[in-house]
Amino acid sequence: MTVPLGPGGPGGTPTGAGAEPAAKRQRDLEAWAGSVPDPELPVITLAELGVLRGVHETAPHGPVEVELTPTYTGCPAVEAMTTDIEQVLREHGVPEVTVRVVLAPPWSTDDISDEGRRKLAAHGIAPPRAGVAGGSASRGPIPLTLAIRCPNCGSTETTLISRFSSTACKALRRCESCREPFDHFKEV
């Protein structure tokens, strides 16, 4: 059974006898694989980050193939994500797991879920602005401001300190109001 992930959940529903168990199994597989925390940003899951692109079971309770799109082509966390996905699925009785890296369509910060953005901000990381990257999930008009909002006090008076922070996908900024440094997840 092959059902791609999407913003509204599984992209299709099997029909006929056994459709409910198959649909539940698909939701379970997606939930288990999607629950893996990002190794570089453990406050959000791979599903919330939008890098989990598909979960495919080739036969009932058989081998599972997972499609993963890294945030960057050379993302050093892909190996850790792969290992973690394999481990969680095996813990839930999946006999064989293959994680495949897919680069098209490319990942965009627009793929981060609203819950993922909320969690980033709650943990002091300014989330990327939605719709700015022009990715597949762009939502609405592009903001007229280029200001980055401080996740601590909400001020838009921020200064770039370094284009790179603890990971290549984040920049280091400082708020001019509260003077606190913070990471900003860059738009890609």
Image (tube, grey):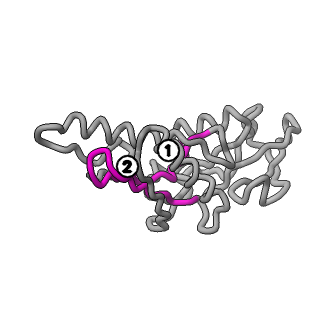
Q: Does the magenta stretch include residue 27?
A: no
Mark 2 crowdedness (10 Å alpha carbons): few <14, some 14-19, many ≥20: many
Name the residue at 70% across, 34% down.
Answer: 123
Q: Are marks 2 and 1 in contact (CB under 8 Å)?
A: yes
Is 147 on the left or on the right of 36, as rendered? right
Magenta range is 44-70
| Residue type marked 1 | Ala
Q: Is residue 67 magenta?
A: yes
Please tell me which residue lies in front, 119 or 143: 119
Q: Residue 47, image x and y in percent?
A: 50, 44
Q: Mark 2 points at which residue?
A: 5
Direction right: furthest residue: 179
Is 142 on the left or on the right of 124, as rendered? left
Can the viewer see residue 163 in this picture? yes
Name the residue at 45% across, 67% down.
Answer: 104
Q: Name the residue under label 1.
A: 47
**In 3D space, how far apart are the residues under numbered discs 2 and 1 (Cα atoms)?**
9 Å
State which quarter of the image contains the C terminus.
bottom right
Name the residue at 60% across, 48% down.
Answer: 129
Please tell me which residue lies in front, 140 or 47: 47
Answer with the quarter of the image where residue 75 lies: bottom right
Q: Residue 6, image x and y in percent?
A: 37, 48
* Residue 93 image label: none
| Residue type marked 2 | Leu
